[in-house]
Amino acid sequence: MAGVTGRFAPSPSGRMHLGNLLCSLLAWLSARHEGGRMVLRIEDLDAARCPRKFADLLEADLRWLGLFWDEGGSAGGPNGPYYQSERSEIYETYFETLMGMGLVYPCFCSRSQLHAASAPHRSDGTPVYSGACRGLPAEEVRRRAALRPPAWRLRVGEETVAFTDGHLGRYGEYLPDDCGDFVVRRGDGVFAYQLAVVVDDARMGVTQVVRGADLLQSTPRQLYLYKLLGLPAPEFYHLPLLLAPDGRRLSKRDGDVSLETLQSRFSPEEVVGRLAFAAHLLEKPEPVTAAALVKDFSWEKVPKEDILLPKGLFDGKGRQP
Ligand code: GLU
């Protein structure tokens, strides 16, 4: 059996925060524990929000933490480019394939139409698309397209897509009710995350995806695309979200510090040790290298429920800033 290939897939819209750091650490440990490779893909589809300087800083930050990768980012490799902003032509081919299958249609709905109070909502709060633009007559499409460029949606079939998450277990969605037709290309021409991530993970040979549980609900959509496009799907491990000590979303006030701040207070080993402690990989928040955690890493140790950041864990200063 071919070995494991994991990946970092950060969106560099700023410096990394504790949630991204924990995700990067676990993705790296999970792949390295299996003797696997790591790919770095920069998810800068929204190029205006993700300037290259943040991607460069991100690479420096991963290296500072001791999370080295084998392929990707500015170092390049055989499956590049590794910046999504440079991969539109590749996405275009797959988009054309879906078009050719008659599965994609233009959608002219405005944001307020999509969020209409009557729309059924997914459990994550986003509206399930009503299908309003499914089957618009060609003439109507032409008339509306002259006014503004449409987004493009994938027509989902009447089926359930279920999978077993390596950490969280079974999860599935009945596509028409739980998911709805979803956007694969935005009105401004940018390809949607759901399509790009599938194409990239498949073409970059990724076999193991580790990411936050906030993306669990994206997985059935992605598995559906893998199937339609005839691409091999990876295994998925979704890690619990890191929350403030009182269970709210992490904010600056609760100590959700950026790596920039952490670097002024702690050594890399102190940051890694504290993150590993928060994820139950260590019994005490003691300094450790990422490499030293590889051998004993196990998903069984990582909690399945949201992780509450232990109070004061990243306050103050470590011993060796
Ligand atoms: N780029 C996404 C993020 O930074 C991650 C996407 C994924 O892991 O599939 O949140």
Image (tube, rainbow, N blue to C red):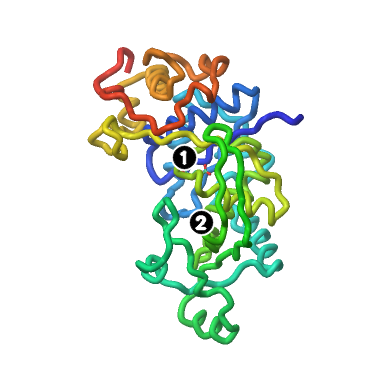
In the rendered structure, which amino acid carries the disc numbered 1?
Answer: Ala
Query: Please, is residue 271 above or below residue 150 in the view?
Result: above
Q: Is residue 282 left or right of residue 185?
A: left
User: Of tags 1 and 2, which is closer to the observer?
Assistant: 2
Could you tell me which residue is drawn at 37 percent across and 15 percent down? 285
How crowded pointer 2 is (Cα within 10 Å; few <14, some 14-19, many 20+) is rated as some
Could you tell me which residue is drawn at 41 percent across and 36 percent down? 241
In the structure shown, which secondary structural element does the residue marked by tag 1 occupy?
A: helix
Q: Which residue is mark 2?
A: 178
Q: Which residue is mark 1?
A: 213
Examine the rendering and report whether any part of residue 16 can be seen: yes
1 and 2 marks in contact (CB < 8 Å): no
In the structure shown, which secondary structural element does the residue marked by tag 2 occupy?
A: helix
Examine the rendering and report whether any part of residue 75 can be seen: no
- Mark 1 vs mark 2, CA separation in Å: 17 Å
Q: Is residue 24 left or right of residue 174?
A: left
Instruction: Give the image location of residue 162, x and y in percent.
Output: 60, 46
For the N terminus, the quadrant is: top right
Query: Please, is residue 124 above or below residue 261 in the view?
Result: below
Q: Is mark 2 within 8 Å of ligand 1?
A: no
Instruction: Give the image location of residue 150, x and y in percent.
Output: 51, 72
The label shown at residue 94 is: none
In the rendered structure, which amino acid carries the disc numbered 2?
Answer: Asp
Quadrant housing residue 318? top left
Could you tell me which residue is drawn at 55 percent across and 21 percent down? 298
Instruction: Give the image location of residue 87, x and y in percent.
Output: 60, 53
Q: Nearer the viewer, residue 185 or 81?
A: 185
Quadrant housing residue 89? bottom right
